[in-house]
Image: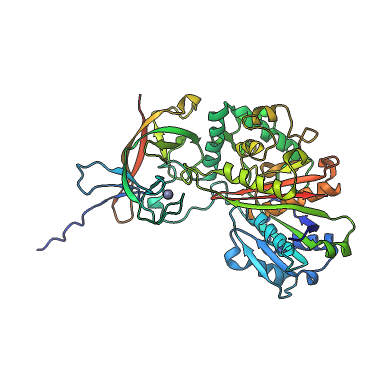
């Protein structure tokens, strides 16, 4: 496999764009990424487009018709919340395999006012939701946090502190949908959605788009003296586990991906200078501290208590403000968190800059399940 | 004058792994499939084993409905038309498989670590009427004291 350089990246501010369609949002992000790389669409040899709700409607090709339909291969990728990061990985593989020298990954989604619970559908007469437990995200990630409480005595406050941290980080991120600090009391006392996650511990939905330009090392040298490198790209599905699929297992799938990614990069968690991880709910972020090896098993509560994952702390997590602040436009999320890392590695992250960041890890989970981990380094 | 025969109203299970006998005197029950090769248990019918991949027909087993709470959430925001808050649990059954269930007999306003491992028992209840007028029967759980 060949080395893969990330030469360009861009995202739009996440939020609500009722007057635009998703192709325009994606085109906007993509043109910015191409400019950042110093190329035009004519240099791109393959495109991987991640979008969960529009992948059955050829959105990748529609974006190309908007920005320059050059006739190159376009693949449409859907992989739940890991849709964008799986598209990134497809572009990565296209270069790493030696088949192409310039590949474009696009992630986009228009969520509208879908809300936390998503759209209903199917035969409601036989829906088990709320009658035989829950399969919707708030309850599922509530249970995932409660499992950590059961194992280690974790308290609701531990989870709430993560929301405080991410919202604090978001104040400095102009790309985030929400940029407001939320004191601990506000987080704890906000409307309960699914215990222990209150409204301020759940990511908002929204629209968004992001894009990344990847190149072979040789090609990258024509455009930049200073690319960042994709040191690892891991993708796992959830292996058999005794309670899965009754209870989705977001832990094993992440641990397996982390091991693969660290092995591939020849690095360990101690080498990371920052992490963007999948904080769809505050409970999710806490369990992933351990799943990614940022702290030992059972130590995530102390890890957040000490402020280790704060910007300025031992290993900053979600300096962007995370999904809790940015919002979570499904297909855009996985590309955007890699672009965020790229900006930090280049020293272009403005007031939220993680000083001297050299190695960043981007983690995404799609429930059902898919986990991607990318390690990006200078 | 001839009368239309009244169409028999049926009692349909909400999920395939709940079986509702036609004889109303017989209790509905949960059932599953057990892999003959590795012993893994799954809810309802299966074509192959999801753990080891064995393709020998799995053995159908009766699930007792006596379980214990592994973890839970208390769901406040839910789909329209449902009562909230409610306790949504993952319940471990002694046969080696888990099931999602609403648990009653706990105060949803006071979630507690004491709920871990609590013994629960399944019961069934009509939860709605389908568009053909049949009863929809669901499995629910109540705490044993
Ligand atoms: Zn088996």
Is residue A228 placed above or below A247 in the rendered structure? below
Name the residue located 30 percent from the left edge and 56 percent from the top edge.
B132
Which residue is more in the foreground, A377 or B87?
A377
In the figure, A26 relative to A375: above or below? below
Give percent across and percent down for residue B8.
Answer: 21, 54
Hey, which residue is sitting farthest front in the picture?
B37
* Apparent side of residue A116 relative to residue B40 in the rendered image (left or right): right
**What percent of the width, then of the height, locates residue A217?**
82, 61
**Viewer-proximal residue among A375 and A43:** A375
Q: Residue at x 83, y 49 (%)?
A: A378
Residue sitting farthest toward the left: B1
Q: In the rendered image, is residue A18 in sight?
A: no
Q: How many marks?
A: 0
> Does the image show residue B73?
yes
Return the x and y of residue B15 as percentages of the image width and height: 36, 49
Q: Residue at x 66, y 52 (%)?
A: A234
Residue B5, by quadrant, is bottom left
Q: Nearer the viewer, residue B93 or A13?
A: B93
Quarter placement of the N terminus of chain A? bottom right
Q: Given the current orientation, which residue lies at the most extreme right position?
A: A225
For this view, does B99 lie left or right of residue A368? left
Residue B24, given in percent of the width and then of the height, sits at 21, 44
């Amino acid at each position: 496999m060949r080395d893969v350089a990330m030469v360009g990246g861009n995202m739009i501010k996440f939020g609500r764009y009722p007057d635009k369609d998703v192709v325009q949002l994606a085109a906007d992000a993509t043109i910015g990424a191409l400019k950042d790389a110093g190329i035009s669409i004519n240099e791109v040899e393959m495109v991987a487009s991640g979008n969960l709700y529009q992948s059955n409607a050829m959105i990748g090709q529609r974006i190309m018709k908007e920005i320059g339909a050059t006739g190159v291969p376009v693949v449409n990728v859907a992989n739940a919340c890991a849709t964008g990061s799986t598209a990134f990985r497809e572009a990565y593989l296209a270069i790493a395999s030696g088949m192409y020298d310039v590949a474009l990954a696009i992630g986009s989604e228009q969520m509208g006012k879908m809300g936390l619970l998503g759209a209903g559908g199917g035969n409601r007469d036989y829906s088990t939701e709320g009658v035989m437990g829950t399969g919707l995200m708030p309850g599922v990630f509530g249970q995932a946090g409660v499992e950590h409480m059961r194992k280690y005595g974790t308290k609701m406050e531990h989870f709430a502190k993560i929301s405080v941290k991410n919202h604090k980080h978001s104040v400095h991120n102009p790309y985030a949908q929400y940029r407001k600090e939320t004191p601990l009391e506000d987080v704890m006392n906000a409307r309960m959605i699914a215990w222990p996650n209150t409204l301020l511990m759940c990511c908002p939905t929204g629209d968004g788009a992001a894009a990344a330009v990847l190149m072979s090392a040789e090609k990258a040298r024509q455009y930049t003296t200073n690319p960042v490198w994709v040191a690892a790209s891991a993708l796992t599905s959830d292996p058999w586990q005794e309670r899965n699929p009754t209870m989705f297992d977001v832990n094993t799938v992440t641990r397996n991906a982390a091991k693969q990614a660290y092995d591939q990069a020849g690095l360990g968690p101690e080498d990371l200078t920052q992490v963007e991880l999948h904080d769809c709910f505050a409970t999710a972020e806490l369990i992933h501290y351990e799943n990614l090896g940022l702290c030992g098993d059972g130590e995530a509560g102390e890890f957040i208590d000490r402020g280790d994952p704060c910007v300025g702390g031992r290993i900053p997590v979600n300096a962007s403000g995370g999904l809790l602040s940015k919002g979570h436009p499904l297909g855009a999320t996985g590309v955007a968190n890699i672009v965020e890392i790229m900006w930090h590695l280049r020293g272009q992250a403005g007031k939220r800059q993680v000083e001297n960041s050299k190695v960043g890890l981007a983690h995404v989970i799609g429930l059902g399940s898919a986990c991607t981990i990318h390690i990006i380094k200078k | 004058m001839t009368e239309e025969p009244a169409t028999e109203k049926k009692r349909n299970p909400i999920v395939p792994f709940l079986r509702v006998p036609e004889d109303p005197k017989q209790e509905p029950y949960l059932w599953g499939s057990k892999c003959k090769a590795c012993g893994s248990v799954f809810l309802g019918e299966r074509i192959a084993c999801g753990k080891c991949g064995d393709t020998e027909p799995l053995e159908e087993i009766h699930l007792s409905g006596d379980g214990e709470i592994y973890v839970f959430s208390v769901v406040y925001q839910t789909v329209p038309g449902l009562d909230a808050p409610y306790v949504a649990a993952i319940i471990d059954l002694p046969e080696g498989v888990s099931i999602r269930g609403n648990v009653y007999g706990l105060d949803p306003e006071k979630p507690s670590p004491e709920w871990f491992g609590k013994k629960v028992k399944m019961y069934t209840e009509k939860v709605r009427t389908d568009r053909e007028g049949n009863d929809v029967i669901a499995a629910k759980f109540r705490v044993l004291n």
